Structures are given as C-alpha cells and as structure tokens.
Amino acid sequence: MRRILLSIGLILAATLAPLSAGHAQLTFGGFAGVNFSNLDITNLDPDEATSSRTGGMFGGYIGTHMGRLFTIRLEGYWTRKGADLTESGNTVGSFKINYIEIPLILRVHIPLVVVKPALYAGPAISFRTSCDVEASGGPSVPCADTPGANLKSTDFSGIIGAGVGVGPITLDVQYDFSFSNILDDPTSSTEVKNKTWTVRAAFGI
C-alpha cells in the first residue's frame, strides 16, 4: 500500500507541476459506475470458458482545459474486475480482482450548445489490492495460493471511451484492456488479460 500511495503522489506531482506553473484552469470531479469485466485467458480446454462479472468502481479526477476542444485528466479510482469461469456452460468458479487504477486521459469535446459529447483515450496503470479465486459453493482462496492463478501486482492498460455532458453531469461508457499478460508465471505459456466495460456517471466543477 505504501508503494501505491507513493506512486500516486509522484504521478500527481508530475502532472500538477506544469499546470500550476502555467496558471491553467483546473477542473475537479468525482464519479461512480458499474463494471462488466472479463478475463481473456489462452490455452483453456474446449469445454472451458470465461464469462462477464458485474462489479463497481468509484473515484475522482483533476483536469485542465486546453482550449475549447481538449481536456487532460488525471484520474484515480478503485475498481473491481475479474471473471466467472464456466465448464460445459456451468459456472464453476470466479476470479475476484480489485485494483486502484490511475489513467491519464485526453478528452476531445464536440462543441454543441446544450449537450457536450466527448471522445477520450489514454493509458492507465493499475495496482492490484486483492485477488481471490472462489470455487462454486466453496470458500475464497487468495490467487497466490491457487496453482496457476497467481497474478502480477500491476497491470498496464489502455482506455477508450465516449461520453455526453449536460451542465456539471457527465455520463461515460468506456472499454479498458490490458496491454500485456498479467499472469505471474514465467514458466507458463498461458496469457491472462483484463478486459472491462464500464458505465459511469460523473459530477464536476
């Protein structure tokens, strides 16, 4: 946790220093939403598959306008990811993974009068706070104690999304996908990647 807080502090300092020096107009906001997450896992048996899990996310952002069309945002939020594991169509277990995620987002605004549509994209780094595997009808076991299920403590991902704002309220839909394998097992040829759809509502000032 100390490493996570230090990393967040360094990212905030690196981002806010040039903004403060240029006397930029800063914006702030908070948001909450719902996730539909899954895991892309290679080398599964033909009768095995993953299916989406529903979770939540909440956090906030600080940003600055760059003219009328562009906004840069540094976001930080807690998010729940993972997937259900199925065998022959029946759910046999679940991956439950929680992250603190920090994206750096560029939003491109479409200047309309009443509503304010926007497209956005950017990279993100995620720090895993917990990871459990739960067998159907059984207890949760830490991923590190489950053979073949130990995941890396960080994930690097990309985010693309679209939103529409009315006044201080914005509704976004975004897709978050891992750039690389998050399975922490150099001897395995299996790859595991997060992929998550999120719908969220934000209130900004």
Image: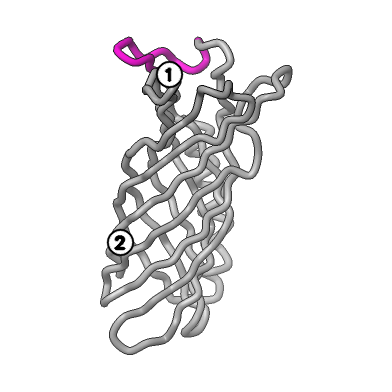
Which amino acid lies under the numbered mark 2 shown in the image of this protein? Answer: Ala
Category of crowding for the residue at label 2, using alpha-carbon neighbours closer than 10 angstroms: few (below 14), some (14–19), many (at least 20):
some
Q: In this view, does 130 lie above or below 157?
A: above
Would residue 120 appear left or right of 191 to someone viewing this image?
A: left
Which stretch appears magenta?
134-145
Which color mode does the image show?
A: one colour
Mark 2–mark 1 CB contact (< 8 Å): no
Residue situated in front as seen by the camera: 129 or 40: 40
For the point 32% across and 56% down, the residue is: 200
Q: Where is residue 56 in the image (x, y as percent from the top left)?
A: 31, 42
Residue 36 is labelled as none
Q: Nearer the viewer, mark 2 or mark 1?
A: 1
Helix, strand or loop for disc 2: strand
Which amino acid lies under the numbered mark 1 shown in the image of this protein? Answer: Val
Q: Where is residue 116 in the image (x, y as percent from the top left)?
A: 36, 79
Would residue 138 appear left or right of 184 to someone viewing this image?
A: left
Q: In which quarter of the image is residue 135?
A: top left
For the point 44% across and 36% down, the residue is: 99
Category of crowding for the residue at label 1, using alpha-carbon neighbours closer than 10 angstroms: few (below 14), some (14–19), many (at least 20):
many
Helix, strand or loop for disc 1: strand
Q: Mark 1 points at which residue?
A: 133
Q: In which quarter of the image is residue 153?
A: top right
Q: Position of residue 161 (x, y in %)?
A: 47, 62
Residue 202 is labelled as 2
Residue situated in front as seen by the camera: 26 or 35: 35
- Is 49 magenta? The answer is no
Q: In this view, does 197 lie above or below 48?
A: below
